[in-house]
Amino acid sequence: MGFINPKLYLAFTKIFGSKESREILMSFLNAILYAGEPMVEDLEIIDAYSAGEIFGSRDTYLDAKARIKDGRTALVEMQVLNVPKFRKRVLYNAAKTYALQLRRADRYQRLRPVIALNITDFEMFPDRSEVISRFAFKETQRLFDYPDSEIELVFIELPKFNKELSELTTLTDKWIYFVKNTSNLETVPDTMVAVPEIERAFQIANDTNLSQKDLDELQKQEFWIQDQQGAIDLAAQQALERGMERGIERGKSELIVRHMRRLIGEISRDIQTQICELNLENLDNLGDAMFDFESVSDLVNWLQEHSRNSTDDI
């Protein structure tokens, strides 16, 4: 037996966002938003991409959307890749959903709260240890709530959740463990079977219950994410290397400027800037040549000559 990866779009929507997932999503929302208390007693799962709701296209990236019985709307998104636009997209989707509740002639009293629940497979807030973070409108100095704080952002950071099966004591723990680790399991753990909604989620996640078409699509999504993550990691490494090289260049240029002052006296800011713009190779060459300089003009001539050489190389 094997299980599909709930972090993939197709798998997540099958488990939490299908018409048959009402009880599963209710249990999940109660676990994450209300510490397992049954505050969500009923809900209606609605099409996350229905016309006029957000964009009317899949660019919204929502994985599940539900209208809770009391009128609140819950938006759920599983985000695997740490892309720059994600943070703004979270705000946009929540604000857009809140605003589009009204039609032209409607009154503001018809507005109902929107909760944007975002599950990330990366750290959103590296300087914080909490797995779950919640944001709402508050006064900045005394931290009291805005009277109509009807948009709430909730984040679950999966990398920060490190509990083992034997440590799962709450419904919240079990659901987060399910999302993070299901694809690595071969059987349903006994501690998870005790929760009917989680047992049902495992049944949906069982890969033997999926068509070959769905399995092929999940594999494509897995490969695409791996490719994208590799590209992101490579870009980050290249940026780090460029930053390290630039730091070395800056340190060498500052050291050369200090030595140059001792050898030939004060040099202008413009000349210092030219030195700072040299690459590592030319900085090393200048470090060797400067002991032969007798005046500032020798330095200026050297910089002009190497500037010409760099242009010729291009």
Image (tube, rainbow, N blue to C red):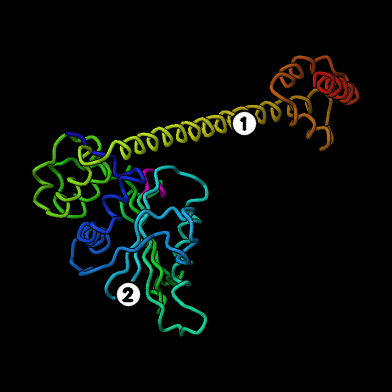
Residue 280 is drawn in which quadrant?
top right
Residue 150 is drawn in which quadrant?
bottom left
274 and 138: which one is in front? 138
Establish if 127 lies above or below 143: above
Residue identified by numbered label 1: 247
3D distance between C-alphas at marks 2 and 1: 55 Å
Establish if 221 lies above or below 35: above
Point out residue 231 in the picture as x, y percentages from the top left corner.
50, 32
Secondary structure state at the residue bearing disc 1 = helix
Point out residue 172 in the picture as x, y percentages from the top left corner.
21, 54
Point 13% across, 47% down: residue? 192
Establish if 183 lies above or below 124: above
Q: Which residues are magenta?
A: 120-125
From this viewpoint, is residue 187 visible? yes
Label 2 environment density (alpha carbons within 10 Å; few <14, some 14–19, many ≥20): some
Secondary structure state at the residue bearing disc 2 = loop
Point out the image quarter for the C terminus: top right
Label 1 environment density (alpha carbons within 10 Å; few <14, some 14–19, many ≥20): few
Residue identified by numbered label 2: 71
Point 37% across, 72% down: residue? 113
Q: Nearer the viewer, mark 2 or mark 1?
A: 2
| Amino acid type shown at disc 2 | Gly
Residue 267 is drawn in which quadrant?
top right
